[in-house]
Image (cartoon, rainbow, N blue to C red):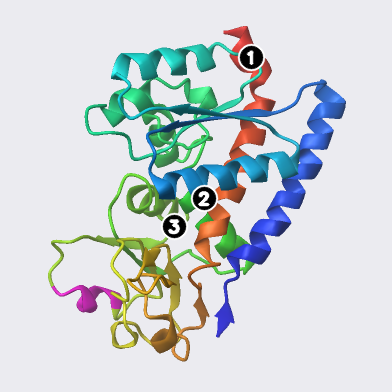
């Protein structure tokens, strides 16, 4: 079994980004900039944002974290985003999700300049991704695709099951796989007899937030399993949506949790920020 080590691969990508930043600073005389908006005091979100901030600093990317109380109005948040849209030093804007219930997430995401949408959530970028056109890709699926590329896992013609249909992972993941000429089945919480779908899959990608949902008897010998889920058990242990111990003797490739897909998300966010920095002239010309 080949362990798909996202921690090691993300470190490699961050070194690539650091070099790309140096080239942009040298050639274009600009420093790539990323703004992150954090609303409220959710501990998990705060930890994730801190990791993004550190990754930017290490790569030489200018980073600003704009913290706002959970009591802010939707209009106040939209005004802040508009200010960032008009700030030429900020190449990427990221709104940390989830947002408080009184704020409409779709309205907020649609207010971000598509050329600064480094999370790849704006309908403009989603539409271009589905159409297999150049766009900002959602960081987690983008990271999974980079893992496939790194390990030379051919997707063309493969039967792939995606478990989970979220806008953040499941849907964009399926689109990228379809663009890679795979045969894709998307399962969700209402899928009947999940095992009947996964048992014949060459590759299974799971992202639902249910500990150990995917077990060894649900996949065929030699399957590739990508576990996007991350769950904290009552004892504090972090585990995935797949039963790693049960699957490791059966799979050809398997991601661990933690240390698998998770680190790739931030690495690909940095990649998107570099892409946005290279589009700065195009934005300013509009």
Residue, disc 3: 181
Residue 163 lies, in percent from the top left, at: 30, 63
x and y, in percent, of residue 160 in the image: 37, 67
Above-or-below relation of 50 to 225:
above
Q: What span is in magenta?
A: 193-198
* Contact check, label 1 and label 2, Cβ < 8 Å: no
> What percent of the width, then of the height, locates residue 266?
57, 48
Question: At 49% from the left edge and 41% from the top edge, which residue is drawn?
Answer: 137
Badge 2 is on which residue? 142
The reply, left or right, for residue 213 in relation to residue 109 is left
Q: Real-space Cα distance between discs 2 and 3? A: 16 Å
Q: Nearer the viewer, mark 1 or mark 3?
A: 1
Residue located 30% across and 25% down the image: 71
Q: Is 70 or 227 nearer to us in this picture?
A: 70
Q: Are marks 2 and 3 in contact (CB under 8 Å)?
A: no
Q: Pointer 1 and pointer 3: residues touching (CB < 8 Å)?
A: no
Q: Secondary structure at mark 2?
A: helix
Element assignment for label 3: loop
Q: Can you identify the residue that label 1 sits on?
A: 88
Q: Secondary structure at mark 1?
A: loop
- Would you say 99 lies left or right of 284 here? left
Q: Residue at x 57, y 62 (%)?
A: 147
């Amino acid at each position: 079994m080949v362990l798909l080590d996202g921690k090691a691969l993300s470190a490699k990508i961050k070194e690539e980004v650091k070099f790309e930043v140096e080239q942009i600073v040298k050639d274009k005389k600009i420093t790539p900039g990323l703004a992150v908006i954090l609303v409220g005091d959710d501990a998990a979100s705060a930890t994730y944002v801190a990791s993004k901030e550190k990754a930017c600093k290490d790569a030489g990317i200018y980073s600003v974290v704009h913290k706002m109380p959970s009591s802010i109005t939707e209009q106040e948040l939209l005004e802040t985003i508009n200010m960032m849209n008009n700030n030429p030093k900020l190449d990427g804007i990221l709104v940390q999700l989830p947002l408080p219930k009184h704020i409409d997430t779709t309205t907020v995401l649609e207010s971000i300049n598509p050329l600064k949408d480094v999370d790849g959530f704006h309908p403009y970028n989603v539409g271009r991704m589905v159409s297999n056109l150049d766009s900002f890709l959602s960081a987690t699926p983008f990271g999974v695709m980079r893992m496939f590329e790194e390990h030379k896992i051919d997707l063309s013609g493969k039967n792939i099951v995606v478990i989970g249909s979220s806008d953040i992972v499941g849907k964009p993941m399926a689109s990228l796989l379809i663009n890679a000429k795979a045969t894709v089945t998307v399962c969700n919480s209402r899928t009947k007899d999940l095992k009947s779908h996964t048992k014949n899959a060459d590759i299974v990608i799971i992202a639902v937030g249910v500990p150990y949902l995917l077990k060894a008897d649900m996949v065929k010998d030699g399957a590739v399993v990508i576990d996007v889920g991350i769950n904290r058990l009552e004892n504090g242990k972090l585990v995935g949506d797949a039963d790693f111990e049960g699957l490791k003797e059966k799979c050809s490739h398997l991601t661990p949790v933690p240390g698998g897909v998770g680190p790739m998300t931030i690495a690909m966010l940095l990649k998107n920020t570099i892409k946005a920095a290279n589009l700065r002239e195009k934005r300013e010309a509009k």
